[in-house]
Amino acid sequence: MLFRAENLDQHYGSAQVLRGVGFAIAPGECMAILGRNGAGKTTLLKCLMGILPTSDGRVLVDDKDITGWSSHRRSAAGLAYVPQGREIFSELTVGENIQAAARAHGTLGTELMDETLSLFPVLKQMWRRPGGALSGGQQQQLAIARALVTKPSLLILDEPTEGIQPNIVAAIKDVLAALKGKISLLLVEQYVDFAMSLADSIVILSRGTVIESVRAEATSREHLSRHIAV
Ligand SMILES: Nc1ncnc2c1ncn2[C@@H]1O[C@H](COP(=O)(O)OP(=O)(O)O)[C@@H](O)[C@H]1O
Ligand SMILES: [Mg+2]
């Protein structure tokens, strides 16, 4: 999927949070969005998913304008979203969380379910446990698995490493690295190293505006850190 955002504006009431945001993600590539707390990263992702309305600009999938589409329709068209803070169903079991997503997308019992679970062995072990009983890192893995069983062409992740223990961060990185090339990834991160280890292109968002847009090989960790230092 070729995914593009053009000139997006967003307002919360009278406060303008996004200003003219634009970028493109080539098929199979990973784009990372870096930026400080409050820069507008989560707001941007919600606009891309149709959870929040934009006040101007366009969102395009393979040159099709999806700007007016509902989040449900975007999800059916191949966008999947792992929100900041994960938002899994804590009362439902791990299995039920995954099955509910798969059922809604017609992938229940397909090979995609097995493939996805093989990426996250811990979820098979925890299959009958309530989602709320998992560690933060395990919940993040569950949220990613739940997104993957919807068969996305673009997986959007909002700070997947936030507050997660290092060994699970490494496991998540391996999964995302293996997905790259097969599907596109849009990764919002505050950790430059994690972003640099996966991204083909990098966008820095500051006060709702893209202040830098570069190929990963054309920039450095030091340069990026200086721009986003909290
Ligand atoms: N529901 C909301 N209503 C009003 N302002 C909001 C809301 N959510 C976020 N904001 C404001 O929008 C700005 C961007 O927030 P956010 O998109 O969460 O940034 P980030 O994800 O980069 O930390 C912040 O100034 C935040 O206070
Ligand atoms: Mg955020």
Image: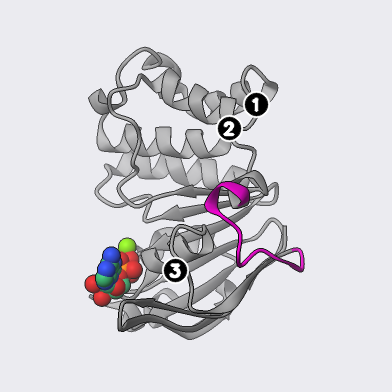
- Position of the N terminus by quadrant: bottom right
**Inter-mark Cα distance, 1 to 3:** 28 Å
Structural crowding at the residue carrying mark 3, measured as other residues with C-alpha within 10 Å and reported as few (<14), some (14–19) or many (≥20): many
Q: Amino acid at mark 2?
A: Val
- Ligand 2's quadrant is bottom left
Residue ranking furthest to the top = 128
Asked if ligand 1 lies within 8 A of label 3, the reply is yes
Q: Quadrant of residue 40?
A: bottom left
Work out whether mark 2 precedes mark 3 in sequence or the reverse, and give the earlier one: 3
Location of residue 42 with respect to 120 vertically, above or below: below
Q: Residue at x 52, y 40 (%)?
A: 175
Quick check: marks 1 and 2 in contact, CB under 8 Å? yes
Q: Residue at x 49, y 85 (%)?
A: 212
Location of residue 49 with respect to 57 vertically, above or below: above
Work out whether mark 1 precedes mark 3 in sequence or the reverse, and give the earlier one: 3
Residue pointed to by mark 2:
149
Q: Is 70 included in the stretch rendered in magenta?
A: yes
